Amino acid sequence: MVKCLYDQLTMGKVLFGTSHFFKAEGELPVPQGFPEVEQILSYHGYLSEVKGDIQGSRLFLTGKIETHLVYRGKEVQDRVSEHGVVWRGEEGAVFNEEINLPELKADWDWELCLVNLILQPEAAEVVKYHLEIEVKIWARKSSMVRFIKEIESEKKIQPVTEQLISEELVLTTYLNREVNNHFPLTYPKPPLARILDCQVIPVDSSATLSKGRVSIEGKLEVYLVYVTLTDEGKEGGIEAQRWTEDNGGAIPFQIIQDNPQLSNEFSANHEIRIEGVQMQSSTPESCRLQVIINVRVDVVRPKPVKVVLDLTSEQEEILDIQRGAGEIEEIIGETEKTIMVEKTLLLPSELKNIGRLLQAKMSGPKLQLQTELEQVLITGEAQLGIVYQSQGIDGEESTVEASFWGRGETEAVSFAEFLEMPGVEDGMQARIYLNANRLRVEQLDERSIKFTLELKTRVKVWQSRTLALVKDVVLVIPQDIPKPSMLFYLVQPGDTLWKIARRYNTTMDSIISENRLIDPEKEIITGKKLLIPKKLIAKRSVTS
């Protein structure tokens, strides 16, 4: 007697995966009541209100970029020349894109990343925007793979098995949370007259799973640049205030979703994106922040898999084995690493010396993955901008200036990192979950700064393998009963070689040999006449 123990996997095979980059441009009018634009100092944007619709073989994308700008305007009496503007919703930068998809019957998934935003003065009251967006696209097809994981037998039959590590995608979900917080301006920072800009960076994020619940936790670092208020009630200079992990001012947040599918045997991968930032002030000594956080969470179930590929026997056992191809995605490697990027950057020669740094901003980073022998190479580049107070030399008044790297003739901040991952080979599939964790810019001297970027990454590498699995096996025992000299069978609808062999207590190899079949899968058709063999073919071992 042979007993088969079965198992199964729900596989989400990746049929197609690519990154598509597109660009968009348009105009942003300076709001009424604001001075005309003389010089743009800094800017950044957040993806918001993104929608995607697949119709046939096309993906239609629409969305908006909440756009923040700091600029120097024409001088206005009793007011500082620097001003901040935020365009939201329909007033902000917008994009529409159509992407042609391969003709595949699959479950499509996509996500967007703003990799580049450039603002340029078009006229005194108009700013032109140029943006570049990366669309990551996947096509997955779910299928059930059933296999034998173990065989029990009274006879000395030994299964030949292989151990794999696979995983099943349980859930992909998007979580949103609005975070509000009240900030007092800490002494000795002067009081606030007018907000110029506010930037928010998520740090120290993590995803945890418990029974029926997924929880995303982390902190938000906040960077504020504002116009100060003098004792006489007039606008003074420019000041910066930071609430960070280093000074204990970062805001903790938690996003929770209940789902009965979840349990602590699963694991979660996540990516955080800020969708909107609004900073307001009702008093000179404080301000209130409103942030919209979006999190993508992929919940997977890691699963060790043992599959039977062959059988061996020490005796002349008559085994009939049903085989079938099974495609399994095998996890080759998985690792987490914090990538530290440190660069010393020099100011372009035409810019004034740095007196005091006020703010730093980064676009991107734009990443690429490449699998190599025993390692994964991560390459990337990011655009960096700083706003600073210049040095006043020889009686010259200090001014607010800005410098960019990665725009115009200056090079972007590039980096490369190797992750050691045993078992990885060239051309394997890889996916990275990225969360930009910290951005620090330190002034080294009047002409140079030190840029430090901390990226939290989680990389998975897998390969699709097609295995010749043992789908079923029986021990065929010859019966001691007379058999007719010739027995014919007429193939019926739904018949297979395996079913016919079971019906007549024979083996598939015996039927194939007796009928001289070359391609049984194609030759076993309804109405075909088969000769059922009297003798059985016994094999000591079956090879795949």
Image: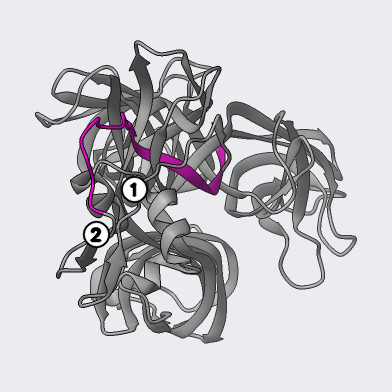
Write the residue at 34% across / 83% down.
58
Q: Which residue is mark 2?
A: 487
Q: Quadrant of residue 422?
A: top right
Write the residue at 70% across / 52% down.
380
Vertical placement of 34 versus 190: above or below?
below
Which of 285 and 22 lies nearest the eye of the viewer?
22
Q: Main secondary structure of the magenta part?
A: strand
In percent of width and height, residue 158 lies at 49, 18
Question: Is residue 24 at least partly visible in the picture?
Answer: yes
Q: Residue furthest bottom?
A: 123
**Amino acid type at mark 2:** Leu
Relative to 27, 184 lies left or right: left
Relative to 12, 158 lies left or right: right
Q: Within the magenta stretch, is there residue 504? A: no
Mark 2 Cα shell of 10 Å, populated few (<14), some (14-19), many (≥20): few
Relative to 422, 109 lies left or right: left
Vertical placement of 54 versus 425: above or below?
below
Write the residue at 27% across / 85% down.
56
Write the residue at 47% across / 57% down.
513
Q: Which residue is mark 1?
A: 534
Which of 108 and 234 lies nearest the eye of the viewer?
108
Vertical placement of 56 versus 245: above or below?
below
C-beta proximity under 8 Å, tags 1 and 2: yes
In this picture the colour scheme is: one colour
In percent of width and height, residue 256 lies at 18, 28
Q: Quadrant of residue 525?
A: bottom left
User: In this picture, which residue range is highlighted in magenta?
Assistant: 460-484
In percent of width and height, residue 98 lies at 38, 85
Helix, strand or loop status at disc 2: loop
